[in-house]
Image (cartoon, rainbow, N blue to C red):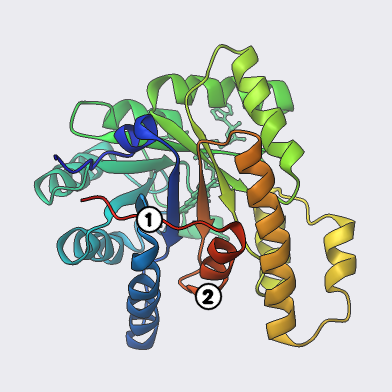
Amino acid sequence: MLRMTRVSELLAAGRTFSFEFFPPQTDSAQLSLGRAIAELEPLAPSFVSVTYGAGGSSRQRTRDVVTWVRRETGITPMAHLTCQGHRRDQIAEILADYHSAGIENILALGGDPPADPADARPSDYAYALDLVEDIADDRFCIGVAAHPELHPRSADRAMDRRFLAAKLRRADFAITQFFFEVEHYLQLVEELADLGVTKPVLPGVMPVTNVGQVRRMATMSGADVPTWLVERLDGVDDPIEVRRIGVDVASILCAQLLEAGAPGLHFYTLNRSTATREIYANLGLRRVAQP
Ligand code: FAD
């Protein structure tokens, strides 16, 4: 049987379960990532994705990780790519390189502008849709980002959904920013359907393992950390207990998403395996590797 290497084919064949990693910056971070991948590989993820530093700061490291995954594991990789700080010719060069390395899946993103505007580099792309249009040919399967609770730069809900629908008409699927209430995801899918878009939207799941970190990421992404979650974590200092609560909350959310018919689950692993493995165990997920 031919191995499926495009996320669109995997989604067409059934539910996907996938993991996000970021490219390590130090030797010890590299070892942690290697260990996380080794510990997660037995769960037979449908695919794994590797983030990209907006402006190209992780260009080589992202490439190293996706090509390593493709060469050394049986897992399908997906490379993230951002508009920020890229000229058209650079993007063409990156895509030609990925194509020759056998990478077929790209997550096309806007990318966040640098904290100091003085660090911004000129870009030929204003929005992720512009990047999608440059990538769109038969060499690649394309994913895009969706923001259930709206992106902080969205003018309003209707505009956000219209721009997302336009992106998804050209792309193959979307992955959402993390969220903690199933209703945010269901509403997003319904609003897209109202605009005539029914391409698969994979919910992004972030198990809370560090309260401060999740609060920071939520502020940047526009996600809400609900009061009930803050109250559950209030006064909990033991990191093992924080993870236990985070895994419990994420397991309930995943069960609700699967029950509601989500086409899969995409886990933000932060390059660690324990929380994801515990959620798998709670959900009774037992994956069988593709032959
Ligand atoms: P866009 O689609 O460009 O949207 C950005 C904003 O502009 C939205 O508010 C949208 O409504 C609005 N907009 C879109 N089109 C128009 C238009 N024509 N006119 C006016 N407004 C418009 N960041 C990284 O740097 N590296 C990563 O690897 C990375 N991975 C991610 C993975 C996932 C699954 C997600 C959800 C996010 C990721 N991000 C990453 C963060 C992402 O790059 C930021 O949230 C970024 O600010 C927005 O990206 P986008 O692709 O949604 O952008």
> Earlier along the polypeptide chain: callout 1 or callout 2?
1
Q: At x 67% / y 59%, what residue is drawn? A: 250
Residue situated in front as seen by the camera: 81 or 284: 284
Q: Are marks 1 and 2 in contact (CB under 8 Å)?
A: no
Q: In the picture provided, is 166 more to the left or to the right than 67?
A: right
**Closest to the observer, 79 or 3:** 3
The kind of residue tagged 2 is: Thr
User: Does the image show residue 126?
Assistant: no
Q: Which residue is drawn at 59% across and 57% down?
A: 283
| Residue at 73% in and 61% down | 249
> Which residue has dot 2 on it?
274
Residue 55 in percent (x, y) is at 39, 54
For the residues labelled 1 and 2, the Cα–Cα distance comes to 15 Å
The tag on residue 176 is none
Percent position (x, y) of residue 143? Answer: 40, 37
Residue 33: name its quadrant.
bottom left
Residue that mark 1 sits on: 45
Secondary structure type for disc 1: loop
Disc 1 within 8 angstroms of ligand 1 (CB): no
Determine whether the residue tagged by mark 2 lies in a helix, strand or loop: helix
